[in-house]
Image (cartoon, grey):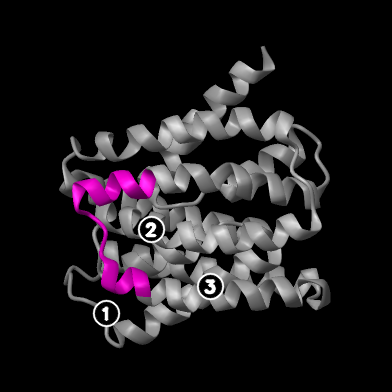
Amino acid sequence: MEWLALIITGFLVGILVISTGGGGAAIYLGLLTSVFNLAPAVAAATSLATAFPSLIVGAYGHYRTGQIHFKVGNQMLIAAVPATIVGALLAPYIPTTIYTWIVAIILTALGIQILYKRFFNHQNKPANHQNIQAVLYGILSGLMVGVAGLSGGGPIIAGLLVLGLDMIPAAATSSYVLVGNTFVGLLFHLSAHSIDWSIGISLMIGAMLGAFCAPRLLAHIDPKKLNTYVKPFMGILLVFMGLKMIL
């Protein structure tokens, strides 16, 4: 019954990541390496293959609800795709320690910025230099995908929240950006590593089902309550992820 447990796990992760704007590859990567003992390279390729179809389903669901902000999303995507390619080409030459510290510091800083805006800055105005910031967040996300085989959702969702989007449109726009980002990363990781389909297919099916349900669940949730509780959660989660990488 391992396949059923995998489908249920994928379903729960699919709902979580599409609702919060993540790609899920980091969660799948952790499961595949720690629980199923896959080699890191195989786990990275399998996690991206698992996350990609669910991102398509989730992004389409968000598109149907009209929550995607294409202008800022396209700015991030145009910056992220070349960065993903560069990251994949440079990955063999980047010391893991240096990369880990850089990402950890950035994630922690983004988390603190989200918490500050939520609790101390009550003016919901768009951030200054929005175009430049969107490009920078896209580049960071692309590097995370290319170098580490992650989906890069952390910088994207954090950046969208910092730029002034509420939680639901931020999650929707993030899903849209991550479709293109993850696809490019998957192509590069597939060229060098194989996918463990015996595990990946069941996770993929569950994740697609969860991604299908997530936008419909969000449509019935009060946006103000979602912002009240989920924004601080995302900030704390980013700080935790950043500190965990270096501690």
Instruction: Determine crowd level at label 1: few under 14, some 14-19, many 20+ residues with C-alpha closer than 10 A.
Output: some
**In the rendered image, which quarter contains the N terminus?**
top right
Three-letter amino acid code of the residue under disc 1: Ala
Pick whichever, 176 or 117, lies toward us: 176
- Residue 33 vs residue 216: left or right? right
In this rendering, the answer to whether 37 lies above or below 112 is above
Q: Can residue 102 be seen in this view?
A: no
**Magenta-colored span:** 58-74
Q: Which kind of residue does numbered mark 3 sit on? A: Val
Looking at the rendered structure, the kind of residue marked 2 is Tyr
Residue occupying image coordinates x 29% and y 40%: 215
The secondary structure that most of the magenta stretch takes on is: helix
Q: Does the magenta stretch include residue 62?
A: yes
Disc 3, SS: helix
- Local crowd at mark 2 within 10 Å, few (<14), some, or many (≥20)? many
Q: Where is residue 221 in the image (x, y as percent from the top left)?
A: 20, 38
The relative height of residue 4 versus residue 51 in the rendered view (above or below) is above
Indicate the position of residue 112 as horizontal and vertical percent values: 43, 67
Q: Which residue lies furthest to the top in this view?
A: 1
Q: Residue 176: give its label.
A: 2
Does residue 127 lie above or below 4 as drawn?
below
Residue at 34%, 37% (x, y): give it: 214
Q: Is residue 192 left or right of residue 126?
A: right
Magenta stretch: residue 159 in it? no
How far apart marks 1 and 2 lie (CA) works out to 21 Å
Kind of element beneath mark 2: helix
Residue annotated with mark 3: 81
